[in-house]
Image (spheres, grey):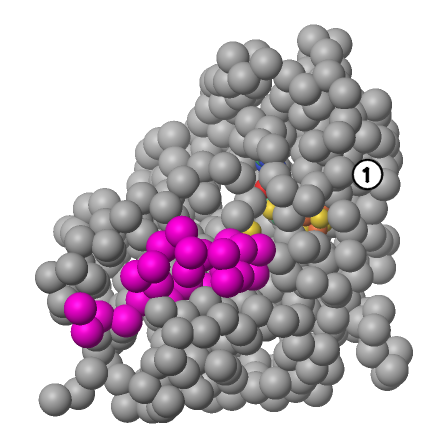
Amino acid sequence: MTKKFHIWTSGCQMNVHDSEKIAGIFSEIGYNEAGNSNDADVIVLNTCSIREKAEHKFYSELGRLKKAKKHNPKLKIAVAGCIAKQKGEKLFKRFPYVDFVFGPDNIESVQGWISDNGPRTSVIGEDPDYHTKLLPVKRAGQVRAWVSIMYGCDNFCAYCVVPYTRGREKSRAGHEIYKEVQSLAEQGFKEITLLGQNVNSYGKNLSKSIDFPDLLYKLHEINGIQRIRFVTSHPRDFSEKLIKSIKDLPTICEHIHLPVQSASDNILNLMNRGYTYKEYKKKIDMLRDAVPDIAVTTDIITGFPGETDADFQCTINALTDIGFDGIYAFKYSKRPDTKALDLPDHVDDKVKSDRLAVILKLQESITYRKNRALEGKKMEILVEGVSETASDKLTGRTRTNKIVNFYGDVSDVGKPVNIKILEAKQHSLFGEKI
Ligand code: SAH
Ligand code: SF4
Ligand code: F3S
């Protein structure tokens, strides 16, 4: 009987895309995807270490699998991703029922592990050539696709584990990215999202001189791709040349995710972010001057060590000042190896939570107000499929990355459709086809 694999994924888009690569390897060696974890011969937990909460989620999932392994001793369990990279062999000691541990650079090692009938081992070393390798990818959708353009991060923001889990920053060659996007276009994909922890520094390690806007101009030429998105942009490296490319190129969507983290210069400095709030705001103003209807989203951390009430007030003021379309906000979480651990004046957990609640509440009203302003407007959406929350409706996104649900025909899937927005909700819009 054909063996089956199941992948559990937590974390950022990069991890979601890595799971597509892990699935690609399993498919190549003849495994099928299991409907759920109970049905699988091999289970991979692709983990995230960005905050304590993500780590706890992994431990509770692993706890569940302990029972599954008791029922089925032949079940193989592998741990992948950022926690795997950080903990390595140590995971075997604490969780004797884990069979294999592999890091983000070692996805191809799955093949050898399976064909050697799964010896208990860990492979977590940084692979200096990982960015040149072409792994098979089993993609989850048929309309939108992820494309890695770079791996790792050299920024060492004081709170962040990513430079330790994903290693040094390395860009993929431009012609390889071009080839991948061209092949996606030929397969019928309509939208691509370029992935990197800091896409604005794309190209730094490459011998051929190319930067991120140059890459966008190249990819724009590919026939069949209607929309190009990218995450994440670092405000320090967000350039005028990039703004010009967004303005010039009709395929580049009018949405930027530009994590500000805090609007206090004191905190930004302690975070090692490399910009002031004024510089950040200036870039947003330039962007909005060039592309007036662009949507801007951001990330915010509350209660970073040393954050006073006055520092926090700066961030509150910035939310109103800038008017983001949406935010992801988190309370500061202590992470292993990071510089922020050694900073003085760690903030009380209750204060962090209270500040987070204030931020989320304020943003809720701003997001809703922004969504309300779209009522009556005509917008183009790219139809992705049936809505997960309302199965009688189809769903898609505007170029500004807002979710729109509407009554339509399944033959609309994969097509751009013009919609009149009828009603704004907190997290989505409802509209009708015109
Ligand atoms: N490369 C991206 C995002 C990395 S992680 C960037 O530079 O912005 C995604 C978000 O998680 C970060 O933007 C930050 O807001 C949040 N984050 C990272 N480490 C954190 C920590 N230790 N505690 C709380 N939030 C954190
Ligand atoms: Fe983490 Fe900063 Fe790198 Fe983003 S830029 S991944 S926040 S170190
Ligand atoms: Fe998490 Fe690793 Fe992504 S820590 S956010 S899965 S890079």
Q: Is residue 170 above or below residue 178?
A: above
**Residue 237 position in % (x across, y down):** 82, 52
User: Which residue is found at the position 50% from the left and 37% from the top?
Assistant: 52
Q: Where is residue 147, by image quadrant?
A: bottom right
Identify the image quadrant of the N terminus: bottom left
Residue 221 visible, this orientation: no
Q: Nearer the viewer, residue 220 or 38?
A: 38
Nearest the viewer among 262 and 347 is: 347
Q: How many numbered discs sit on the rendered protein?
A: 1
**Residue 81 x, y percent position in the rendering:** 50, 61
Which one is nearer the viewer's eye here, 180 or 151? 151
Most foreground residue, 213 or 167: 167
Residues drawn in magenta: 73-98
Q: Position of residue 365 (x, y in %)?
A: 48, 20
Q: In the rendered image, which quarter is residue 293 located in?
A: top right
Which residue, as the protein is rendered here, is positioned at the far front?
93
User: Vertical placement of 344 versus 104: above or below?
Assistant: above
How many residues crowd around disc 1 within 10 Å: few (fewer than 14), some, or many (20 or more)?
some
Residue lying at 77% horizontally and 34% vertically, measured from the top left: 271
Mark 1 CB within 8 Å of ligand 2: yes
Magenta stretch holds residue 87: yes
Vertical position of residue 313 compared to residue 286: above or below: above
Residue under numbered circle 1: 272
Please give left or right for residue 416 compared with residue 227 in the image: left
Is residue 342 at all visible to an observer of this figure?
yes
Q: Residue at x 22, y 70 (%)?
A: 75
Specify whether residue 384 is painted magenta. no
Image point 39% across, 74% down: which residue?
120
- Residue type at mark 1? Asn
Residue 410 vs 380, above or below: the answer is below
Q: On the rendered image, what quadrant is the C terminus found in?
A: bottom left
Residue 401 in the figure: left or right of residue 204:
left
